[in-house]
Image (tube, rainbow, N blue to C red):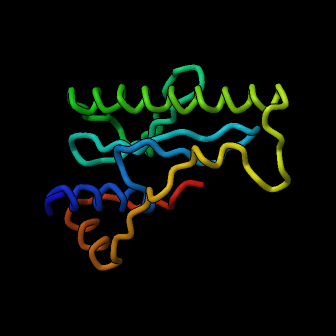
Amino acid sequence: MDEFEKTIRMTGAIQTGGEVPNQLIVRPGSDEYPEIYAHIMDIEMDVFTVTFNIDDTFKFQTHSMDYLALDRGTLDLLLDLQSEAESVWGCVQDIHAQIDAGDIVLQNGIDPLQSLYTKNDTLDVPDRLAEALSTHLHIRTRPQRG
């Protein structure tokens, strides 16, 4: 990864509270189902969040942006991420079916979906660099989800 790509990733991470943009993130959710989402950078380097639902629908959260500026590459990325999310949802359904059939016995305190959760999905941006990029690029920071 070259310096430009690193800067782009850091710029996205500043806007997401440290989560890496443009990759699928799977976190514990509610009602025994995970939360599956991605932070996407548009062509103006603004970040919005897409939640991938079990019914193959997307939910866009634009974080007070007036508009999104997307190119073909971003749309292709969304479709690739949706395909990954569909695979994760398939695994979730399989695990729930195995639990219902008694093939998986739930143990106290152990999440049967933990193997699906994303690891190493955060990027630590030094405070001084985050402040400089935020000021220079006029981007806003926000706290990490979850």
Is the residue 143 above or below the residue 34 in the image? below
Q: Quadrant of residue 93?
A: top right
Residue positioned 24% across, 67% down in the render:
133
The foreground one among 141 and 77 is: 77
Residue positioned 32% across, 55% down in the render:
12
Residue positioned 21% across, 61% down in the render:
7
**Where the N terminus falls, by quadrant?**
bottom left
The foreground one among 53 and 100 is: 100
Q: Position of residue 17 (x, y in %)?
A: 45, 61
Q: Position of residue 138 (x, y in %)?
A: 26, 60
Direction from residue 68 to residue 17 in the image, left or right: right
Direction from residue 61 to residue 30 in the image, left or right: right
**Where the C terminus falls, by quadrant?**
bottom right
Q: Quadrant of residue 20?
A: bottom left
Q: Position of residue 110 (x, y in %)?
A: 76, 53
Residue positioned 35% across, 77% down in the render:
127
Most extreme residue toward the bottom is 128
Direction from residue 102 to residue 1 in the image, left or right: left
Q: Position of residue 81 (x, y in %)?
A: 40, 33
Q: How many marks?
A: 0
Q: Quadrant of residue 105?
A: top right
Is the residue 114 above or below the residue 133 in the image? above
